[in-house]
Amino acid sequence: MAKTTRQARERRHARLRVRVTGTPERPRLNVFRSLEHIYAQVIDDTVGHTLASASTLDPEVKKALGKDGKPKIEEAKIVGQLLAQRAKTAGVSAVVFDRGGNRYHGRVKALADGAREGGLDF
């Protein structure tokens, strides 16, 4: 049995990864959520390359958030939109969503919605 919340999430993610893999036609959109930040990558698992990435630490996101910042759900949505824009420039229009063992809820869902608004199909 998992001893910590992190170990439980990693076990769920391992189960999820059995089914979810990224191909050149539909790479994997991976989400990692920490307490303070959220990170997302578009990954082609056949060669192990990251095609696009975005996080709340990016200067473009910080500029969009402003000096005082915004609620974390709004931050996640902005990250999703930026990731979609970067994926489009990398030639990716369709992805497979990998929630990273987290529930599809809150910031993870907001990031996915932002990516859909940005034009990614999943």
Image (cartoon, helix red, strand yellow):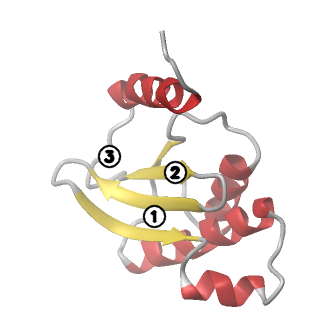
Image quadrant in which you'd find residue 57: bottom right
- Distance of label 3 from label 2 (alpha carbons): 16 Å
> Tag 3, which secondary structure?
loop
**Residue under the point 83% across and 65% down:** 71
**Residue under the point 66% across and 33% down:** 103
- Residue 65, placed above or below residue 75: below
- Residue 4, placed above or below residue 63: above
In front of the other: 112 or 76: 76
- Please indicate whether residue 45 sits to the left or right of residue 6 in the image: left
Circle 1: is it few (<14), some (14-19), or many (20+) Cα within 10 Å? some
Residue where numbered disc 3 is placed: 22
- Please indicate whether residue 52 sits to the left or right of residue 67 in the image: left
Front label number (2 vs 1): 2
Image quadrant in which you'd find residue 13: top left
In the rendered structure, find residue 32 and report the number of the disc placed on it. 2
- Give residue 77's position: percent from left, percent from top: 71, 65
> Tag 1, which secondary structure?
loop
Residue where numbered disc 1 is placed: 93
In the rendered structure, find residue 9 and report the number of the disc placed on it. none
> Tag 2, which secondary structure?
strand
Q: Is residue 4 visible?
A: yes
In front of the other: 65 or 1: 1
- Give residue 121's position: percent from left, percent from top: 54, 55
**First in sequence: mark 2 vs mark 1:** 2
Specify the amino acid type for callout 3. Answer: Gly
- Residue 61, placed above or below residue 13: below
Specify the amino acid type for callout 2. Answer: Phe
- Please indicate whether residue 18 sits to the left or right of residue 55 in the image: left
